[in-house]
Amino acid sequence: MFVSHLNVAEAEGLCSRFTTGEAVTACSEGIFMQLFEPDESDPKAMANLPSGRLTAEPLYPCPEQPAAFRGGCYYYAPAYFLQRHDYARHPEAYAAGLAWCRNAPVADGGRDACTMGLGSRIMKYNIDREQWSADQCEKAPAQQLRPCFAGLVSYYRVHYHDRAAADRLCARLSGRSRSHCRQAAAGSTSAAD
């Protein structure tokens, strides 16, 4: 996205040059990480930011993405949602984000990717508040618990660069959160795996 200055189609074209699915996925994650949290010091990028469409429909442009890029888009979309809802001063934005992710389509995995991305952001923005972060996921309906906890676990592993970090996280949690965490850790495929 730095090379394309937030031109999603151009960046996807560059990512499509990779020969493995894993490389395309990693590249696509970079596209949407940058789209939803742009470098505001790059005037060319900011000129390409579709802020009007993102504000009107924060899941944009996810539904229209090619299949190889859709998951990464839904995963990073919560970053924009949380920024728009001033999550730092309004912690209720996390519960609102869970409700918002329920608007993503179930059929193509959009809702799970969005919820996992939100769980990852909850942990990223509250890395020193493990139980509080888990409590935010506990506010989700049953169908969102697993992906939300998967996001918590995934980010915790990435942050500490250690697959065993999930065990430490789960041990710090209590009650149902510990059980949800262990289930998510057993099925996790984070970048640190």
Image (tube, rainbow, N blue to C red):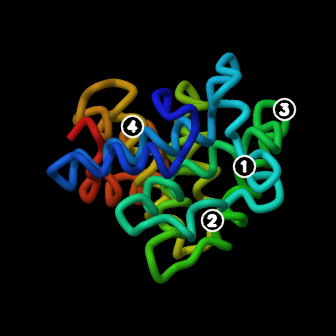
Q: Secondary structure at mark 3?
A: loop
Question: Tag count in the figure?
Answer: 4
Q: Which residue is mark 1?
A: 81
Q: Which residue is mark 2?
A: 140
Q: Nearer the viewer, mark 1 or mark 2?
A: 1
Q: CA distance from mark 4 to mark 2?
A: 19 Å
**Mark positioned earlier in the residue sequence (1 or 4):** 1
Residue 76 shown left or right of residue 49 in the figure:
left
Dots 2, 3 in contact, CB < 8 A: no
Q: Residue furthest bottom?
A: 107
Residue 129 located left or right of residue 169: right
Image spot of residue 1 (x, y percent) = 49, 35
Q: Say which amino acid is labelled 2.
A: Ala
Indicate the amino acid at tag 4. Answer: Leu
Residue at figure coordinates x 68%, y 39% from the top left: 48
**Distance from the alpha carbon under mark 2 to that under mark 3:** 21 Å
